[in-house]
Image (spheres, helix red, strand yellow):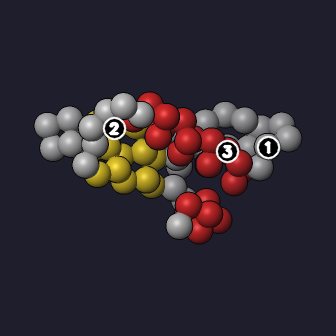
């Protein structure tokens, strides 16, 4: 599994964007798994930080539905 997750910070406005559109399937993992791992990794980076807003962008409808 290779993840192309990108996390962008704007600490002054207290928001973060997690983008997983570069995640691809490698080996035994599905694209769905790759997207969710990318989102989890991005959220893990934010633990302990004071963020008012987090925007998660992904091109995988199944991942969006699982999060909702």
Residue 58 vs residue 54, the one in the foreground: 54
Could you say where residue 33 lies in the image, as x and y percent from the top left? 71, 48
Q: Which mark is residue 41?
A: none
Residues under numbered marks 3 and 2 in contact, where contact means CB atoms less than 8 Å apart: no
- Taking the spot 14% from the left edge, 37% from the top edge, the residue there is 12
| 58 horizontally vs 37: left or right | left
Label 3 and label 2: CA atoms lie apart by 19 Å
In which quadrant of the rendered image does the N terminus lie?
Answer: top right
Judging by the rendered image, the residue that carries numbered circle 2 is: 8
Residues under numbered marks 3 and 1 in contact, where contact means CB atoms less than 8 Å apart: yes
Q: Which mark is residue 34?
A: 3
**Most distant residue in the front direction:** 48
Label 1 and label 2: CA atoms lie apart by 26 Å
Residues under numbered marks 1 and 2 in contact, where contact means CB atoms less than 8 Å apart: no
Could you say where residue 14 lies in the image, as x and y percent from the top left? 21, 42
Rendered position, 26 above or below 19:
above
Q: Is residue 61 visible?
A: no
Q: Residues within 10 Å of mark 1 (few under 14, many from 20)?
A: few
Judging by the rendered image, the residue that carries numbered circle 1 is: 29
Q: Is residue 67 visible?
A: yes
| 48 horizontally vs 67: left or right | left
Residue 9 vs residue 24, the one in the foreground: 9
The tag earlier along the polypeptide, 3 or 1, is: 1
- Taking the spot 69% from the left edge, 54% from the top edge, the residue there is 32
Q: Secondary structure at mark 3?
A: helix
Q: Secondary structure at mark 1?
A: loop
Q: Residues within 10 Å of mark 2 (few under 14, many from 20)?
A: few
**Most distant residue in the left direction:** 12
Residue 46 vs residue 39, the one in the foreground: 46
Label 3 and label 1: CA atoms lie apart by 7 Å
């Amino acid at each position: 599994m290779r993840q192309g997750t990108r996390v962008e910070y704007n600490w002054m406005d207290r928001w973060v964007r997690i983008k997983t559109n570069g995640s691809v399937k490698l080996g035994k993992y599905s694209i769905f798994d790759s997207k969710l791992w990318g989102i989890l990794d991005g959220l893990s980076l934010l633990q302990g930080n004071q963020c008012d807003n987090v925007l998660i962008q992904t091109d995988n409808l199944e991942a969006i539905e699982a999060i909702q």
